[in-house]
């Protein structure tokens, strides 16, 4: 079964049809830079352009970097604040004419990793962290998602966690991988204390260089890199939309 998955990010919007039974893209990803400012009208126009590119008719799953409740955005991370209170799901449906499901971006990546990636076959409490410009999170208990967790906003040393331990902070402050890993270890240690997970999966852009920081982590919980990398959001979005078929 194929569903179109679209991943909306702060810098790019990308999509591809997904075989949700195998967790693979059936065509090459198509990416368009996120318009600036990333206001609802402009972003949904780009989504419609991606749908048109694939000549798509059918269910669409879409990620969005925000707390999403019944298709409505309740926050706006790396997009314009005009999104807050916007019914993204209805707006994209109106632009495309197709049934649409919109979910939080980290939740989508987590769904994909749990079914086809590093979390496959793992029960108990699994926490997926997507580390890039910010820090997204997804919590699974025996394979069931607790949606819209925002663990990147936990306070650490008087700062929001992602303002101390994201990959953007490492880059902006020109931190060595070892120094940055200490920050990440402290942040993840705080989560470990609060949730007692059985497994951490580290995704996002930083997962491509996991060998540079993973050896410096001293957590009791097992930590593994995500496996689906840049395709996780697209695959997870499509999977989240299978209820529409």
Image: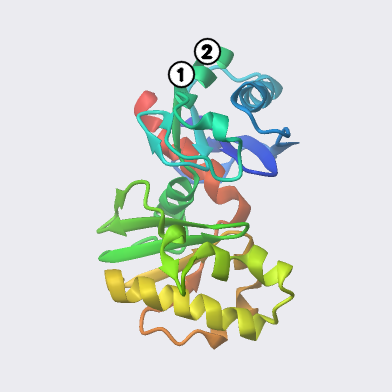
What residue do we see at 66% from left, 38% from top? Answer: 14
Q: Are marks 2 and 1 in contact (CB under 8 Å)?
A: yes
* Callout 2 secondary element: helix
x then y, percent, for residue 79? 61, 39
State left or right for residue 146 relative to residue 100.
left
x then y, percent, for residue 171? 72, 68
What residue do we see at 55% from left, 83% from top? Answer: 182
Sort mark 2 into few (<14), some (14-19) or many (20+) by Cα contacts within 10 Å: some
Given residues 136 and 229, the one toward you in this image is 136
State left or right for residue 54 relative to residue 84.
right
Q: CA distance from mark 2 to mark 1?
A: 6 Å
Q: Relative to residue 1, is residue 235 depicted above or below? A: below
Q: Relative to residue 239, is residue 151 depicted above or below? A: below
What residue do we see at 53% from left, 30% from top? Answer: 83
Sort mark 1 into few (<14), some (14-19) or many (20+) by Cα contacts within 10 Å: some
Whether residue 97 is visible: no
x then y, percent, for residue 224? 48, 73
* Callout 1 secondary element: helix
Task: State which quarter of the image contains the C terminus.
Answer: top left
Q: Which residue is mark 1?
A: 90
In terms of image quadrants, where is residue 188? bottom left
Given residues 93 and 169, the one toward you in this image is 169
Whether residue 175 is visible: yes
Q: Which residue is mark 2?
A: 94
In terms of image quadrants, where is residue 116? bottom left
Q: Relative to residue 166, is residue 38 depicted above or below? A: above
Q: How is the image coloured?
A: rainbow
State left or right for residue 189 relative to residue 43.
left
Task: List the single residue furthest toward the front.
Answer: 158
């Amino acid at each position: 079964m194929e569903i179109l998955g679209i991943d909306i990010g702060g810098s790019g919007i990308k999509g591809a049809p997904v075989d949700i039974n195998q967790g693979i893209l059936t065509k090459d990803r198509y990416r368009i830079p996120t318009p600036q400012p990333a206001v609802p009208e402009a972003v949904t126009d780009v989504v419609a352009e991606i749908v048109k590119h694939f000549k798509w008719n059918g269910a669409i799953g879409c990620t969005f970097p925000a707390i999403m409740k019944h298709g409505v955005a309740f926050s706006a991370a790396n997009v314009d604040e005009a999104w807050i209170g916007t019914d993204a799901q209805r707006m994209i449906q109106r632009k495309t004419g197709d049934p649409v499901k919109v979910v939080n971006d980290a939740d989508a990546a987590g769904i994909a990793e749990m079914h086809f990636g590093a979390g496959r076959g793992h029960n108990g409490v699994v926490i997926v962290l997507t580390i890039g410009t910010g820090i997204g999170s997804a919590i699974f208990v025996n394979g069931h998602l607790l949606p819209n967790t925002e663990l990147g906003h936990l306070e650490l040393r008087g700062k929001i966690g992602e303002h101390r331990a994201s990959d953007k902070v490492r880059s902006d402050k020109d931190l060595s991988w070892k120094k940055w890993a200490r920050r990440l270890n402290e942040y993840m240690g705080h989560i470990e204390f609060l949730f007692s997970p059985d497994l951490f999966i580290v995704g996002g852009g930083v997962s491509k260089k996991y060998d540079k920081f993973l050896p410096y982590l001293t957590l009791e919980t097992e930590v593994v890199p995500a496996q689906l990398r840049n395709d996780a959001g697209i695959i997870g979005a499509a999977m989240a939309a299978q209820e529409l078929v």
